[in-house]
Image (cartoon, grey):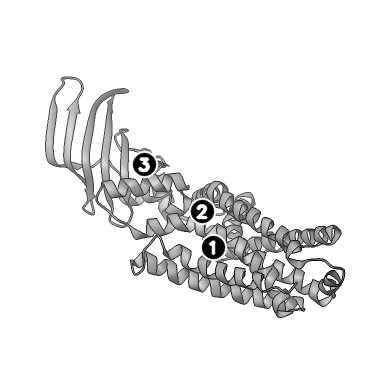
Amino acid sequence: MKILKKLYIKEFLTLLSIVGIGLSLILSLINLIEKLDDFMKYNPSFEDIALYVVLNIPKNLFYLLPMAVLICGLFVFARATKSMEIVALKAGGGRIRSLLITFIFIGLIMSTFAFLLGELVMPLSMEKAEELRIEMTSPMQQDISKSSSYQRPFFKEGIVWLKGKDDSIIRIGLFLYENEIAHDIDIFLFEKGSLSGHIKAEKALWNGKMWTLVNATRYFFENGKIENMKEMPYPNLEAPKYFKVGLKTTAEMRIGELLRYIKRMKQSGYRNPKLIVDLHSRLSYPLINLFMLILGVSLPLETHISRGLIAAGIGLSISLLYWMGYILSISMGNAGIIPPFLAPWLMPALFAAIAIHLFRKIPE
């Protein structure tokens, strides 16, 4: 029993490594081919192109892992069913469920691995890949580089730091990408290398040509003067397109950053269901690996699937069905049709129920 268990575990993990990394690499290469024409316009080096492919692998692995886990589980136990190993195990007095308990622990490990991959590795690799893509393909980046005063904005925990045209340092507490509105503005003014003043504004609005600070207060450090203004044109902050480039998307944020970003939006009077959906999907999507593995090892034993290619086809079909349902529920959550916190959990809950039901029906 122990020998058989080790053989199944070794076969599963070997196959999972090949399928998971292989599919992730193929998807990265397909993504590269789609962008190759844009890359070639600026003659990037082979090293940059290869690095771009590698940096996309963690994201692809994160999203493909449930499918790979399901297909590999189906394949291993379909092969075991075909070779009559399961029948021999039963004849020898072995209990199938005790064999499969080990795979439940492996499923928990896969879910933990996926969570850590999505929380620690994927945000960093996506950020680096996007920076590299911008450097290699964006015409806007060519325009930006002509401005001697421009420096790439620094983004941390939802806060944007950047340099103004007059060498001022600007802090934006909350920037709304869609509306081109900045909230909680602090501008630190310098003169001859020394801090000369500070402008604090409730928000800044873009009128297509220039930013206008709303409810602004300007502090003059030299004479101690304070000036309050309902509106203040500010020409030294670059247009939104300049500091949108390179800013983190919510997919590139870790859970802690995302929580603080949501809190700032609430404090500014904005509610975005998509952020709640994104937050809960960080937990629900990794968890599905556990139930996909339970489903993958239970289905061949319950339905007597014995051919590897059929098992792989069934795994692919189930994965596509899951993704379609998951995307639909996420879209409904983003639109507010169903509660945003519930949307990412609907399909995992459904597949968990199916997997547990099949596992309990496995004949001993």
Q: Disc 2 residue type?
A: Arg
Q: Which mark, by number, is residue 133?
A: 2
Residue 231 in view, yes or no: yes
Left or right for 58, reference 257: right
Which quadrant holds the N terminus? bottom right
Question: Which one is earlier in the sequence, the residue at label 2 or at label 1?
Answer: 1
Closer to the camera, 49 or 129?
A: 129
Question: Which one is earlier in the sequence, the residue at label 3 or at label 2?
Answer: 2
Query: Which callout, 3 or 2, points to the residue nearer the camera?
Result: 3
Which percent across, then down, holds residue 41?
Answer: 52, 58
Residue at point 33%, 66% (across, down): 336
Closer to the camera, 361 or 172?
A: 361
Which percent across, then down, holds residue 5?
Answer: 80, 60
Left or right for 40, reference 103: left
Q: Disc 3 residue type?
A: Ile
User: Is 181 above or below relative to 307?
Assistant: above
Element type at mark 2? helix
Q: Residues within 10 Å of mark 1 (few under 14, many from 20)?
A: few
Mark-to-mark CA distance, 2 and 1: 9 Å
Mark-to-mark CA distance, 1 and 3: 30 Å
In the picture of the structure, the residue carrying the numbered disc 1 is 35
Closer to the camera, 76 or 48?
A: 76
Pointer 2 and pointer 1: residues touching (CB < 8 Å)?
yes
In the picture of the structure, the residue carrying the numbered disc 3 is 159
Residue at point 51%, 61% (across, down): 38
User: Is 188 above or below relative to 42?
Assistant: above
Question: Which one is earlier in the sequence, the residue at label 1 or at label 3?
Answer: 1
Q: Residues within 10 Å of mark 3 (few under 14, many from 20)?
A: some
